[in-house]
Image: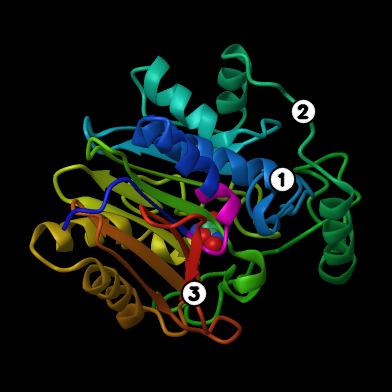
Amino acid sequence: PTVRPLVINTWSFTSAAEAAWKVLELGGSALDAVEKGCTQCEIDQCDGSVGYGGSPDENGETTLDAMIMNGNTMEAGAVANLRRIKNAIGVARAVMEHTKHTFLVGESASLFAESMGFTSEDLTTSKSLSIYSKWLDQNCQPNFRKNVIPDASKSCGPYKPAKGLQAGKQTVLQKDIDVRNHDTIGMLVIDKKGNIASGTSTNGATHKIPGRVGDSPIIGAGAYADSTAGAAAATGDGDIMMRFLPSYQAVEYMRSGADPKAACQKAIVRMQKHVEGFMGAVICTNTTGSYGAACSKAPGFTQFHFTVFKPGFSRPQTEV
Ligand code: SD4
């Protein structure tokens, strides 16, 4: 039997699922529900890893990555390294609907957002500042990059090859990435008409090198949607996941007949085969609203929670 409408999102972000569900109950579209749901997480600063005031980079700045995809039209919009704008998924949708482009990045993405009427404000909070200051004191040398960032009193580097990097086993950032700093929202929605949409929003990885973009805004990596096959979203170590397009892969597995859980598992296994100790999870739904998830366990990451709202539920429920 077909389950409609359906909201499923990564982690225990129930306020996001609730916001998306409200849109669907009123007859809204999958796309509106995804935008509303992920926006709620940006407002709530879900787990400190979505929205403003989280994951300060090496300069102490919070920057955001987001994408949204319409599985009916296969249109998508994305922003990465977005500065000063809180509603990253809103900007991603504006890229999709108001330009002929798909992906805008960095300062230019922020200028686009401002021109579209999004408020420009500081994304730093006392919390992000304190995370940054502690880390800076412990990890960085004074004035290393003074030539690059003239007003930096301290900064990081020089960067050395990470152990096993040549063999593709590890990334420079992997040691900094664990369950505490890695909770992107990825959301999949099927509306009453059967339209499927997906989206993500994140502030990425804590202490990232400025300019670092994760998997979340990359179409097919962070999320994917195709109303003829299903949708998927990923969370975890984006520096690794973006090399495998796990969301695209999982949707294609479902198109070839895999059930959602198996599709998620197969996408995870492909990454595990190549990267020892890799940490990540994928959620999937097919066109009938059957859904599933899989994760790659790592030290500090032994259980992956995701949230579901579907007919018969009076509130979102978290599943493992
Ligand atoms: C990233 N994948 O930027 C994101 C972070 C994440 O759960 O998913 N956290 O690498």
Considering depth in this image, is 304 or 281 the residue closer to the camera?
A: 304
For residue 132, side relative to residue 227 (left or right) = right
Q: Is residue 190 above or below residue 82?
A: below
For residue 256, side relative to residue 276 (left or right) = left
Question: Hey, what amino acid is under mark 1?
Answer: Thr
Q: Residues within 10 Å of mark 3 (few under 14, many from 20)?
A: many
- Magenta-tinted stretch: 10-17
In contact (CB < 8 Å): disc 2 and disc 3: no
Determine the secondary structure under disc 1: loop
Q: How crowded is mark 1: few (under 14 residues within 10 Å), some or many (20 or more)?
A: many
* Pointer 1 residue: 62
Measured Cα–Cα span from mark 1 to mark 3: 25 Å
Numbered circle sitting on residue 41: none
Numbered circle sitting on residue 121: 2
12 falls in the magenta region: yes
Residue pictured at 78% horizontal, 48% vertical: 59
* Pointer 3 residue: 304
Q: Position of residue 124 (x, y in %)?
A: 81, 42
Measured Cα–Cα span from mark 2 to mark 1: 11 Å
Q: Position of residue 78 (x, y in %)?
A: 44, 35
Residue pictured at 22% horizontal, 34% vertical: 72
Q: How crowded is mark 2: few (under 14 residues within 10 Å), some or many (20 or more)?
A: few
Question: Hey, what amino acid is under mark 2?
Answer: Glu
